[in-house]
Amino acid sequence: MPAPTPTDYFAFYGLPESFRPDEAALKRLYYAKSRETHPDFHATSSPENQAEMLRQATLNTYAYRTLADADQRMAYLLRHHGLLVEGQSEKLPPDFLMDVMDLNEQLMELELDPTPAAVAPVAAEAQALADGLDAGIEPVLAGYEQLPADHRSAALHQVLTYYLKKRYLLRIQRQVATFAARS
């Protein structure tokens, strides 16, 4: 089933836009909307109302799945603000690209020697880089909801940079995991 037309998922639930929404409230709102819109409860209503309830139920499912998952929620917020566009390339800081290049070179070396002793330091370096990224962005994610509107754009750009860096590192971590499984 295709995703419903773009909607402000936070407004749909009456929640403030946040990278760290109240998960219990989100779940309660999801279940309440599920009860309101479930097609079985509208089986005797007009075909138009049935179609609308089905659309609302589908929207509820997509909105909840998106907002309940931290990575999907981050990508959603970045797309919602026009910052994450498919096919658009963003410039990442040269120091990060150098770190990634170093990790990629180490991955090429693992092709020749995929032993646990060779994989462990690469995995540790990639994890340390990821942990540093996570620690650096956490205050921005946690404080976003309280920011004045005129400061949110800068925060969103920081989150975009983090998101793109994290995607690079996830690919590297997956490759390291593949080598670890082989060894």
Image (tube, helix red, strand yellow):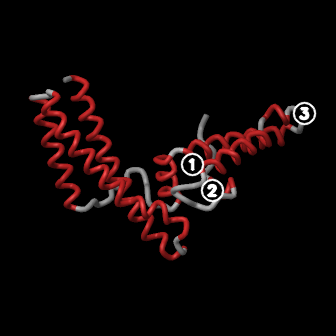
- For the image shown, how many numbered marks are present on the structure? 3
Task: Give yes or no for contact between labels 2 and 1 (Cβ–Cβ under 8 Å).
Answer: yes
Residue 105: horizontal and vertical position, in percent? 13, 43
Q: Secondary structure at mark 1?
A: helix
Which quadrant holds residue 116? top left
Left or right of 150, for residue 1: right
Query: Could you give the CA–CA distance between mark 3 and mark 1, rounded to whole angstroms?
Result: 32 Å
Q: Secondary structure at mark 3?
A: loop
Task: Give yes or no for contact between labels 3 and 2 (Cβ–Cβ under 8 Å).
Answer: no
Mark number, residue 67: 1
Query: Where 43 falls versus 31 (above or below)?
Result: above
Q: Residue at coordinates 51% horizontally, 57% vertically from top-left? A: 19
Mark 3 or mark 1, whichever is nearer to me: 1
Residue 100: horizontal and vertical position, in percent? 21, 49
Say whether residue 88 is visible: no
Q: Residues within 10 Å of mark 3 (few under 14, many from 20)?
A: few
Q: Secondary structure at mark 2?
A: helix
Q: Residues within 10 Å of mark 1 (few under 14, many from 20)?
A: many
Residue type at mark 3 is: Thr
Task: Give yes or no for contact between labels 3 and 1 (Cβ–Cβ under 8 Å).
Answer: no
Q: Quadrant of the N terminus?
A: top right
Q: Quadrant of the C terminus?
A: top left
Residue 30: horizontal and vertical position, in percent? 69, 44
Which of 6 and 27 lies nearest the eye of the viewer?
A: 27
Q: Which residue carries the number 3 mark?
A: 44
Q: Which residue carries the number 2 mark?
A: 10
Residue type at mark 2 is: Phe
Give the mark nearer the N terminus: 2 vs 1.
Answer: 2
Give the mark nearer the N terminus: 3 vs 2.
Answer: 2
Q: Residue at coordinates 27% horizontally, 45% vertically from top-left? A: 127
